Amino acid sequence: QVQLVESGGGLVQAGGSLRLSCSASGSVVNINAMGWYRQAPGRQRELVAQITRGGDASYADSVKDRFTISRDNAKNTVYLQMSSLKPEDAAMYYCNVIWRTTYQRTFWGQGTQVTVSS
C-alpha cells in the first residue's frame, strides 16, 4: 500500500502561482511514475502532468510552458509548480502514483483544491 498526502492548494488570482506537493509513504520502493490529475465540477478527471522515476516529464497541452512537474526520489515527493494560472485551471488536483512489481497498481491522494479568481 502507498499513502499519498497532498498540500499546497488554495486561492490565487489569475496570473499567480501555486506549488503543490505530494508525499508518498508505505511501499514506496516500487513507485514508478508519479503525476497530477485534476477534475473540475461537471468534467472528467484529466491528466495534468506525469514524471517517471528517471525524471522524464510529460504535460497536458493546456498546461505546457506554465506548469512544471518535478520529483525528489529521496523524499518520495512529487511537486507541481503552477504559474500563470488561469480561471480554467481551477479544479481539485489529485496526486497519482503508479506502483509496479510483477503487477501494477494505481494509488490516489485525497485531492487539494485550487481556486483561481479572475
Image (tube, grey):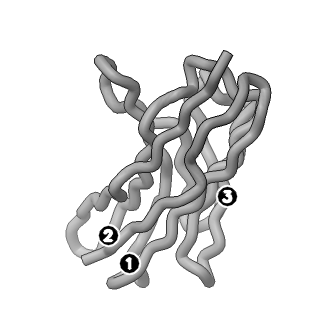
Mark 3 Cα shell of 10 Å, populated few (<14), some (14-19), many (≥20): many
**Mark closer to the chain start, 3 or 2:** 3
What residue sits 33% from the left and 83% below the top? 27
Residue occupied by mark 2 = 100
Mark 2 Cα shell of 10 Å, populated few (<14), some (14-19), many (≥20): some
Q: Residue furthest left?
A: 103
- Label 2 sits on what residue type? Arg
What residue sits 53% from the left and 48% below the top? 50
- Label 3 sits on what residue type? Ser
Vertical relation: 66 (above or below) 10: above
Mark 1 Cα shell of 10 Å, populated few (<14), some (14-19), many (≥20): some
Do the numbered discs 1 and 2 sit on residues whose CB atoms are within 8 Å? yes
The quadrant the C terminus occupies is top right
Vertical relation: 24 (above or below) 98: below
Mark 3 element type: strand
Nearer to us in this view, 16 or 59: 16
- Picture coordinates of residue 20, whole percent (x, y): 60, 53
**Cα separation between marks 1 and 3:** 18 Å
Q: Nearer the viewer, mark 3 or mark 2?
A: 3
Nearer to us in this view, 8 or 73: 8
Q: Is residue 61 left or right of residue 84?
A: left
Mark 1 element type: helix
Residue occupied by mark 1 = 30
**Cα separation between marks 3 and 2:** 20 Å
Q: Which mark is residue 70?
A: 3
- Picture coordinates of residue 58, whole percent (x, y): 60, 41
Q: Is residue 40 left or right of residue 63?
A: left
Do the numbered discs 1 and 3 sit on residues whose CB atoms are within 8 Å? no
Vertical relation: 39 (above or below) 5: above
